[in-house]
Image (spheres, rainbow, N blue to C red):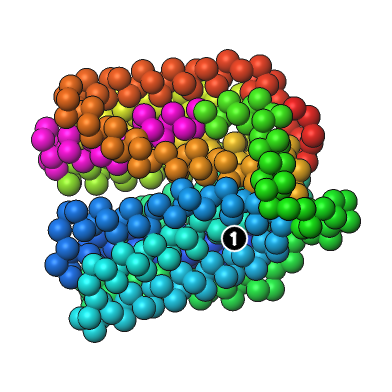
Amino acid sequence: MLTTVRVPAVLREEPQYRLLFGSQVLSVLGDRVTMVALPFAVMSVGGDVGAVALVSAAQFLPFVVLALPAGVWADRWDRKRILVTSDVVRLVCQVVAAALLLSGRADVVHLTVLAAVYGAADAFFAPAFSGLLPTTVTPANIQPANALRGLTFSVGSIVGPVLAGVLIAVAGGPGGALLFDAATFAVSVALLLPLRSRVVDAVAEEDPTATTEHFWASLRDGWGEVRSRSWVLAFLGGFAAYHVAVLPAIFVIGPVLMEQELDGARSWAVVVACFGVGSVLGDLLFLRWRPAFALRVAALMLVGASCQAAFIGSGLGTWGIGALELAAGVCVTGAFTLWETSLGEHVPERSLSRVSSYDYLTSAGMIPLGNVLAGAVSAAVGIHTALAGMTVVGVGAALVVAAVPAVRHLPRGAQSTER
């Protein structure tokens, strides 16, 4: 008996979002392929661990420098053009890197420079995307649109590493994998070009200064939008603590602990896969469940997400830790989906990219600091003591966020100006 696959309502009802979503499905998968392929590309040209770290830092550091300016420009310029330009730049970077690798002419310097240019383009993409997404859907569909976007990341995190391994094995090494990523950017551009957001003209009429005021005035206005909302400030602080004190358990300490106490890469692959499954389940949950107080639920899920350091150090074995990380995956995707939804519902569209840029700065921008601190602290006091301390900091910060009245009582809304 044949069964029909139910297409999520947001895809059926929102033609512009279909274009935006379609542009990202393959692109996210390509990004996950690159995350695996790039370190092997560095090592294939003779780079050591230090070279791998250098290329990784080169790709990430432009985000720290450019996040706030990118948010300002995304609120002043055509966001779709920013996305298209970013995709084209990253496409060129991947094509050049792939050509150099496949021809045997690549070296660490080439890959470092290309990674830096790629990272700069990525820094412009993120706040522009956050500002554009709510303009492609009706207010009632902001949450499922964010949940569906999150689902692409979750599925990509599971499928991407497997696909990367296949491409590296059968497509000429890491260069072939990067060429696949380049192709995904071409698809993304093709789908973005016909996209038309629903409120651009209305916003221009409502606030003609949005594209004419001075850059620094626009930057100050963006900070004013952040500062005037205590729930935004609370979550920025909570996410900063999460990225500094909790995520290093995944990025730095987890793989080391698995190597020392369990079955190394095999154990870590199980744990990561379980987290990915949990993320998918969380995304599916929030495609349907729309809690009346979204941030209240997001804060509670941030508490659960912040337990990951304790989960990693629990000593429960591979599958026990994996089961806990599955629950963490639900919490992580729930916290971020409801947070992004609340921004889209309550922050004026003309300022959304600027506010989102502070989000990216206090989250992704904190990862290098957290990784360095985690390495130093674990070396000084031991892995398990470090994981316990990380849990105390992360969970404590999340509980503070959950205690903020504006977080507990913020209602659902659509482009509301309530504080």
Determine which quarter of the picture holds residue 44.
Answer: bottom left
The picture places residue 395, in percent across and down from the top left corner, at 42, 20
User: Principal SS element in the magenta part?
Assistant: helix
The total of numbered circles placed on residues is 1
At 64% from the left and 20% from the top, the residue drawn is 408
The picture places residue 252, in percent across and down from the top left corner, at 25, 39
| Residue 415 in view of the camera | yes
As displayed, is residue 405 above or below residue 145? above
Does residue 251 show up magenta in the picture? Answer: yes
The picture places residue 321, in percent across and down from the top left corner, at 26, 31
As displayed, is residue 353 above or below residue 407? below
At 30% from the left and 38% from the top, the residue drawn is 371
Q: Residues within 10 Å of mark 1 (few under 14, many from 20)?
A: many
Q: Amino acid at mark 1?
A: Phe
The picture places residue 135, in percent across and down from the top left corner, at 73, 54
Q: Nearer the viewer, residue 232 or 301?
A: 232
Residue at far right of view? 205
As displayed, is residue 228 above or below residue 28? above
At 89% from the left and 56% from the top, the residue drawn is 205
Residue at far bottom of view? 103
At 59% from the left and 52% from the top, the residue drawn is 69
- The magenta span reads 238-264
Determine which quarter of the picture holds residue 271.
Answer: top left
Local secondary structure at mark 1: helix
Q: According to the image, label 1 marks what residue?
A: 21
Q: Is residue 411 left or right of residue 320?
A: right
